[in-house]
Amino acid sequence: MSNSYDAAADTLAAIHDAYRARTPSSAAWNERASAALVSGVSGSVRHFSPYPISCTHGDGSHTTDLDGNRYIDCFLCGATLLLGHRHPAIMAAYADVVDAGSIVLNPVRATELAEQLQSMIPSAERVRFVNSGTEAVLNALRIARAFTGRPKVVKFAGTYHGMDDQVLVGLDARGTRLGHGIPTSAVADTVVADLDDLPALGTLLAAGDVAALLTDPSMHHCGLWTATSEHYRAMAELAAAHGTLVIFDEVISGFRLAAGGGQAWFGVTPDLSVFGKALAAGEKLGAIVGRADVMAACDVSDRRNGPFAFQSGTGSDATFGQASALAATRTYAALDAAGAYAEIAQRAHRLADGLERAFAAHRLACRTTRLGPIVRLFLADGTLDRAGAMRLSHRPIDAFHLALVTEGVLTIPGSNDFFLSFAHTDDDIDEIVAAAGRVLDRFDLAALGAPHASSTTRLAEHATETP
């Protein structure tokens, strides 16, 4: 026991030493930042041990830190930069509106952007803009409750839907709330269900008090173990039969799996959908879209008929957010027409296969899931499924991602993800794989709990993309 503990401690210390040697300016900056910002960062997921790097700028598929180190960026600022850093269309949009002011009343650009979304997203009969994906989720739930007159919402085990109290439950294998400060009353009308168990879902819906099913079609927080298109269609039909709305949380899947989002990818049109992240290519903006009759619940032009759901937000007409989103969505549509979505998915497969080969060469068990331009890495032996992935130890995979930073690849320890942008090239992919190989040459991940490979290592059904 002592020897294994010492080996683990030595490996982790070696990774930390290499990280500190590469990023001394970030270490000093984090010390300064921590005296002003909680943990030295603006959000919990941006912090990791021993300290996070601080970046100064980005360009294309790369970002640069305070020490001048250049990284292939697979974090993309929380998956917002689907076009990469400083995409010409986005920079041109900024230049076009720089003299327009930060925000004006009812800008014409809001209509143009809504029309663009209508042309791309199957469910977008009507549109409202908000400040973020979190705001989009909480407003979509309010609209669904107003429209149906029902109190409850069903979300699925393991899914993440933003920072609103009512959905910060059931994120892990234990079904617990995420952190403290979330009262029981906030989640009293949130029911956590098993995505795969349609009969049990039918029993829940039969009670007649469920306003909406809320799901992320990419199942990103669950390791990309999606359902099949047939399963999502059956779920939607079951919901419709019981008068329950289906809400797709497309904050991750939107514009990433297809120009029309996860609903276009899977061929299932929900009643409501929410978007954020890639919508505005790094700027602050979210959107709620959906059926005209459902979205009419927040229509203030005629409140004499039907239910009313209040929805508003000061910053949702911000000039730069809407300008960036209009440029981004037009670019996604053009990329789709040019076949670029197939190309970026092929690069994700190239990356996933390369990572698996790198680990196999070191006799370590590694498997990946991949969906569109997202790759998720797991260090596990034997059969692996959604529930099993949620129970895996974070120690070896977090150490691997931190070690990747020392080799010039930026991901975030605490996340198993590699997010690709349209700016990433085949050369970038090959360098990421080579960097992974160098990490495995330098550091003994087995000492940290990474399992050795065996002939039984495989993924459960539906672990890779199957629209």
Image (cartoon, rainbow, N blue to C red):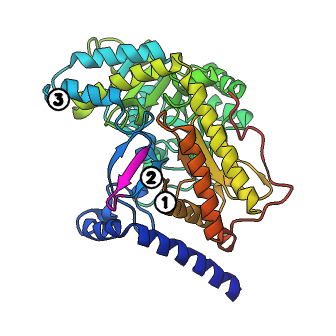
Name the kind of residue labelled 3 in the image: Val
Name the kind of residue labelled 2 in the image: Tyr
Residues under numbered marks 1 and 3 in contact, where contact means CB atoms less than 8 Å apart: no
Which quarter of the image is occupied by the N terminus?
A: bottom right
Indicate the secondary structure of the residue bearing disc 3. loop
Residues under numbered marks 1 and 2 in contact, where contact means CB atoms less than 8 Å apart: yes
Q: Where, by quadrant of the figure, is residue 48 drawn?
A: bottom left
Name the kind of residue labelled 1 in the image: Val
State the residue lying farthest toward the right: 455
State the residue lying farthest toward the bottom: 2
Q: Which residue is mark 3?
A: 98
User: Is 340 in front, or is 417?
Assistant: 340
Residue 114: x, y in percent? Answer: 35, 17
User: Is 59 in front, or is 94?
Assistant: 59
Which segment is the magenta one? 62-68
Seen in the picture, residue 314 relative to 19 is either above or below; the reply is: above
* CA–CA distance in space, label 1 to label 3: 35 Å
